Image: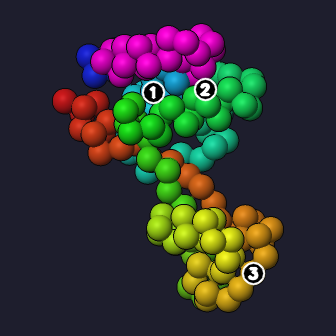
Amino acid sequence: MNNAIDKYVKRICEYLHEYPNDISMACINIISKIYEHDVNNIYHLSFGRLYEWSGIENHEKFNIALYILVDSRINILEQHFEAFNEIKNRFEGVDDDFIHEVLTTKDYVHPFTFETISEVEFNKLINIFFTPTKEFRENLSE
């Protein structure tokens, strides 16, 4: 294993000392899999892939583990949003601030046409994915 991995494992163990062990193990499993698959070649991690890599069977605990990996104090994953742009016939990124504003105001609009849509339509349209943070990539590449 890489020394940077050891540093992140230690950080997670310190941060999660009051959490159940399976949550910290899920975090460690995800970190290890990212390392095994070469962090510099990973740009799109879905919930499904991360869930599989976590080795945990409880969805609630998985969500906690994922939240921890996104936490700026741990700084391993970044959350991103995308939606299918029907005009261009491809998936495109959606700005975090746009998502935050829509969720805060509850004024659901299509991210590309800006037409008013329902909350259900908005949730079906927006996909969440994750990428390793720049810091994590750099540390694992050393």
Mark 1 — residue?
31
Q: Residues within 10 Å of mark 2 (few under 14, many from 20)?
A: many
Q: Residues within 10 Å of mark 3 (few under 14, many from 20)?
A: few
Amino acid type for the residue under numbered disc 2: Ser
Task: Indicate whether residue 72 is drawn in magenta.
Answer: no
Q: Where does residue 90 sit, x and y in percent of width and height?
A: 57, 75
Secondary element under disc 1, as helix, strand or loop, is: helix
Give coordinates of residue 53: x percent, y percent: 59, 29
**Which label belongs to residue 54?**
2
Q: Secondary structure at mark 3?
A: loop
Residue density around tag 1, few if under 14, some if 14–19, many if 20 or more, within 10 Å = many
- Residue contact at pointers 3 and 1, CB within 8 angstroms: no
Residue 16 shows in this picture? yes
Q: CA distance from mark 3 to mark 2?
A: 35 Å
Q: Is residue 15 magenta?
A: yes
Q: Earlier in the sequence, mark 3 or mark 2?
A: 2
The answer to whether residue 15 is left or right of residue 64 is left
Q: For the residues carrying marks 3 and 2, which lies nearer the camera in this image?
A: 3
Q: Which residues are magenta?
A: 6-26
Horizontal relation, residue 15 to residue 51: left or right: left
Q: Nearer the viewer, mark 3 or mark 1?
A: 3
Tell me the element at label 2. helix
**Amino acid type at image mark 3:** Ile
Say which quarter of the image contains residue 82.
Answer: bottom right
Name the residue type under label 1.
Ile
For marks 1 and 2, give the CA distance. 9 Å
Residue carrying label 3? 117
Q: Residue at x 80, y 68 (%)?
A: 120
